[in-house]
Image (spheres, rainbow, N blue to C red):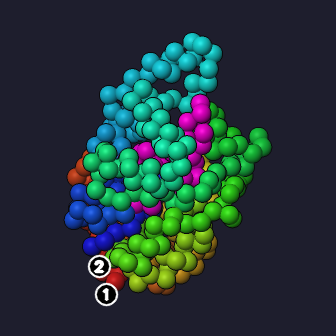
Amino acid sequence: MRVLALSGGVGGAKLCEGLAAELTSGNLTVLVNTADDFTHLGLSICPDIDTVLYTLSGRASKSRGWGLSGETWQAMDALAELGGESWFRLGDRDLATHLLRSEELAAGASLSEVTLLLAERMGIDARILPMSDDAVRTVVQSNEGDLPFQDYFVRRQCEPEVTGFRFEGLAEATLNPGLRAQLSREPPDLVLICPSNPFVSVDPILQVDDCWRLLGELSAPVIAVSPIVAGLAIKGPAAKMMAELSMPVSAGAVLKHYTSRYPGLLDGFVIDESDATLLPNLQTPGIQVAVEATIMKDREQKRHLARRCLALAKSAAT
C-alpha cells in the first residue's frame, strides 16, 4: 500500500514511525505542518518537520518526546549567560539541522528541497514534504491579544486563554508542488490524518490551497485518528484549546470539527478503546468509526496502530 500521512509533531510522528515499519520501502509520504515554523536567532526553525525527521531516523529523544537523543545545551547556556534569548531551547546537535537548513535556504533552495536533503542524509526512505514552500504562520488569538504560535506554545507554556486562530500567509500559499505531481503519478491507497492537533497542525495542512478538496477527490479512503483520548490530549494543548473554545473535550468533538469544516472528506475515524462507549453517538453516514488502541508508548504499539489503520483502509475501500 502507498500511504500519504498528514502530520504535526510528536503524535503524528509516532504513527508515521509505525507506518514506516509496516510499509514496503518508499511507500510512505508524510505531508507535514509548517505553520508553526519561525525564524529564531537568525535560523529557520521547522519544529514539526524536525520531529518527523528525528523520529523516522531513530534520533528522537524518547525521554523528552522532542529534539535529539544524547543532546547537550552548552550553546544555549552560553547564550543565556550573555543575555541572549534562550527561551526556545535549541540543543547543540539540533543546531546543526537549523544551520544547514538556513544555509541551503539562503542559497536559494526551497524548503521541500532542503527537507528531502535532510531526510536522505539521515537515512530516511519515506518522502517527507512540507505542506508548502511558502511561509504560513499560526497566530494564536487569546485573552492577551494575538500571539505568534511559538510565543504561545513555548515562551508562555500555553497559559493564555485561546479564543481562535489565524494563519498568516495561508491565502497566498500554494500546496507543495511535488505532492500534486506525486498524487497524479502514484496516487495513494490511503490518506491518513495522524493524531495531531486538529486546529494548529491539521487545519493548516488541509486548508492550504484547498488541499482537503484535492484529497477528497482521490479514490483512496481518508481516515483520521483522534488525538483526544478519554477527554485528554496525549501530547500538547489540544484539550485545553477545545475547552477554551467551548467545545466538548472528546473524540466526538474532533470528528464533528472535521466533518463540519471539511464535508465529505472522511471515510473513516479511529477512536481509542477507552472511548468505546462513545461509539453509538459517533455514527455518521459515510464514515466508518473504528475502536483501536491508539496510545503509542513503544514501537510495537506504533506498529499495531499502523496495521489497524491499514486494515481499516482496506475495509473502507471495499
> Of the residues shown, which amino acid type is indicated by label 2?
Lys
Residue 61 lies in magenta, yes or no?
Answer: no
Q: Quadrant of residue 313?
A: bottom left
**Real-space Cα separation, disc 1 to disc 2, in angstroms:** 7 Å
Q: Which residue is mark 2?
A: 314
Q: Is residue 167 left or right of residue 287?
A: right
Q: Residue 193: x, y in percent?
A: 44, 65
- Say which quadrant the N terminus sits in: bottom left
Residue at (39%, 53%) from the top-left corner?
116
Does residue 52 belong to the magenta stretch?
Answer: yes
Q: Position of residue 35 (x, y in %)?
A: 58, 52
Q: Residue at x 55, y 71 (%)?
A: 211
Looking at the rendering, the stretch of residues picked out in magenta corresponds to 30-53
Circles 1 and 2: CB atoms closer than 8 Å: yes
Which residue is at 54% across, 53% downward? 34
Q: Who's the residue at 32% across and 50% down the image?
A: 120
Residue lying furthest bottom: 318
* Residue 239 can be seen, yes or no: no
In this rendering, does residue 184 appear at all?
yes
Mark number for residue 318? 1
Where residue 241 appears, as percent x and y from the top left, is: 61, 51
Q: Nearer the viewer, residue 318 or 275?
A: 318
Task: Give amino acid for label 1.
Answer: Thr
Q: In the rendered view of the protein, which quadrant contains the C terminus?
A: bottom left
Label 2: how many residues lie within 10 Å, few (<14), some (14-19) or many (20+)?
Answer: some
